[in-house]
């Protein structure tokens, strides 16, 4: 008799253990596909299937136990359900009020683009470069999305060496002063601009300069020179399950001004719009402010502002946000560095962002990007100053522009 009870208890525990193991497994494997096929309610399907199997198994063995054992099992099950439900509620509260993001935005992608890394993804010239920089190398820095491009410039014009993308150290964190240990680094837009005007780097590859950044340069008496080196599209994107395919430029400004709050107001379904943003000083946020055309940008909740473009992509691509989310970035970053499998780019005024519409200027949010330098540098050797001018001239030459095209951008000419 005791052996039968023990065996029955073991079977029951195995069923309970199996259910708690299978549910996460099913969710991991089938949640995305179920959500895609059945919509938002499909995310519950992977939970329901093993749960039903568990209930059937329990009903099958229930009659094997006497009343006393059944009561004990019932109490254990109720306790497990309460604990599981409590954990779920706490998780949802934490998830909704915090931003779960990768702080090393794009790190692995950038490492793969280092100039002379084995099997680097940085573009190469078809033949020998007409420029080979000798002596003091200009220190290159810039935006995440432009690193693959200026890494390709270094690959062509710099002596072969190890140029580590994150090889720099802070000498003063309060003023963001750095010491570059490599000649080709990437701090992202804001820090790259600060290092340029502080004299810690020599060329910053950026999508543009914000009013605040220009004011910071003026305060230091720094004169900036912006050399256009290519063209890019600023794109707005939604989850690929969102039924909306395009909006007008007026719709975009009204959404980010807080005047339009539901997709039904711009031709979509009656779902709230969750319009994400980037921090002030980032390249994409600077571009958004330019697009606003004098309208005041709404102040978003803290959890809807993302330090990295990759973070914004992850949240918009999430099946949990497919009805609501709206993000923005630069075309190359999403298409070629991240891959836009889970999002789609919105047409603006009926025009999709393509190489052809960017080159022609038909796509309304087309803009130049720049190699930014300081016109009146202090404590810079004559040799380095000459090398900066040589490099800028070569970037705008046929060879330099061929690398712009090979990388995935549109040349300026």
Image: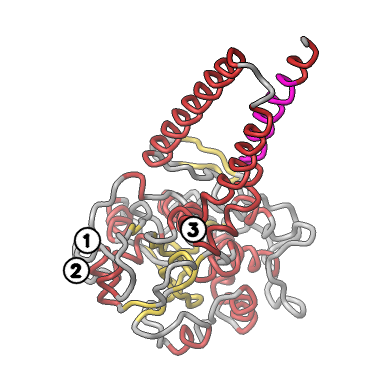
Magenta part of the chain: 8-24
Tag 1–tag 3 contact (CB < 8 Å)? no
Residue at x 49% of width, y 58% of height = 313
Residue at x 27% of width, y 56% of height = 215
- Tell which circle, 1 or 2, labels the residue nearer the N-terminal end: 1
Q: Residue furthest top?
A: 2
Alpha-carbon span between mark 1 and mark 2: 14 Å
Alpha-carbon span between mark 3 and mark 2: 27 Å
- Image x and y of residue 25, in percent: 66, 43
Q: Is residue 86 visible?
A: yes
Image quadrant holding the N terminus, namely top right
Tag in front: 3 or 2: 3
- Image x and y of residue 236, in percent: 41, 69
Residue at x 63% of width, y 37% of height = 54
Residue designated by label 2: 294
Residue designated by label 1: 258
Q: Name the dominant secondary structure of the magenta segment.
A: helix
Q: Secondary structure at mark 1?
A: loop
Q: Does 265 sit above or below residue 173?
A: below
Alpha-carbon span between mark 1 and mark 3: 21 Å
Indicate left or right for 185 with 125 as reference: left
Tag in front: 1 or 2: 1
Indicate left or right for 270 with 313 as reference: left
């Amino acid at each position: 008799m005791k052996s039968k009870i023990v065996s029955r208890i073991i079977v029951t525990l195995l069923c309970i253990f199996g259910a708690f193991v299978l549910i996460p497994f099913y969710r991991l494997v089938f949640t995305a596909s179920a959500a895609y096929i059945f919509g938002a309610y499909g995310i519950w399907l992977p939970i329901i299937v093993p749960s039903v199997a568990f209930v059937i198994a329990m009903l099958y063995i229930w009659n094997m136990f006497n009343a006393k054992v059944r009561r004990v099992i019932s109490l254990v099950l109720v306790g497990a359900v309460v604990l599981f439900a409590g954990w779920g509620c706490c998780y949802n509260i934490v998830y909704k009020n915090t931003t779960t993001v990768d702080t090393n935005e794009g790190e692995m992608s950038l490492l793969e683009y280092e100039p002379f890394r084995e099997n680097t993804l940085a573009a190469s010239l078809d033949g020998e470069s007409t420029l080979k920089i000798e002596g003091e190398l200009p220190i290159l820095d810039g935006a995440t999305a432009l690193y693959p491009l200026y890494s390709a410039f270094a690959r062509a014009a710099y002596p072969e060496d190890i140029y580590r993308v994150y090889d720099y150290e802070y000498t003063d964190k309060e003023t963001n002063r750095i010491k570059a240990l490599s000649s080709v680094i990437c701090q992202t837009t804001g820090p790259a601009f600060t290092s340029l005007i502080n004299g810690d780097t020599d060329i910053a590859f950026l999508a543009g300069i914000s009013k605040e950044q220009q004011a910071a340069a003026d305060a230091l008496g720094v004169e900036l020179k912006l050399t256009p080196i290519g063209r890019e599209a600023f794109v707005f994107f939604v989850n690929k399950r969102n039924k909306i395919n395009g909006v007008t430029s007026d719709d975009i400004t009204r959404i980010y001004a807080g005047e339009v709050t539901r997709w039904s107001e711009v031709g979509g379904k009656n779902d709230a719009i969750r319009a994400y943003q980037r921090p002030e000083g980032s390249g994409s946020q600077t571009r958004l402010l330019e697009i606003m055309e004098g309208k005041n940008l709404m102040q978003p909740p803290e959890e809807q502002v993302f330090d990295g473009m990759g973070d914004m992509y992850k949240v918009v691509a999430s099946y949990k946000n497919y009805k609501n989310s709206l993000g923005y970035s630069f075309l190359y970053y999403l298409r070629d560095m991240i891959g836009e499998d889970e999002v789609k780019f919105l047409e603006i005024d009926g025009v999709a962002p393509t190489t052809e519409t960017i080159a022609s200027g038909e796509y309304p949010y087309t803009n130049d990007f720049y190699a930014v330098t300081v016109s009146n540098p202090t404590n810079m050797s004559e040799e380095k100053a000459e090398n900066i001018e040589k490099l800028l001239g070569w970037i705008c030459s046929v060879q330099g522009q061929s690398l712009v095209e090979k990388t995935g951008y549109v040349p300026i000419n």
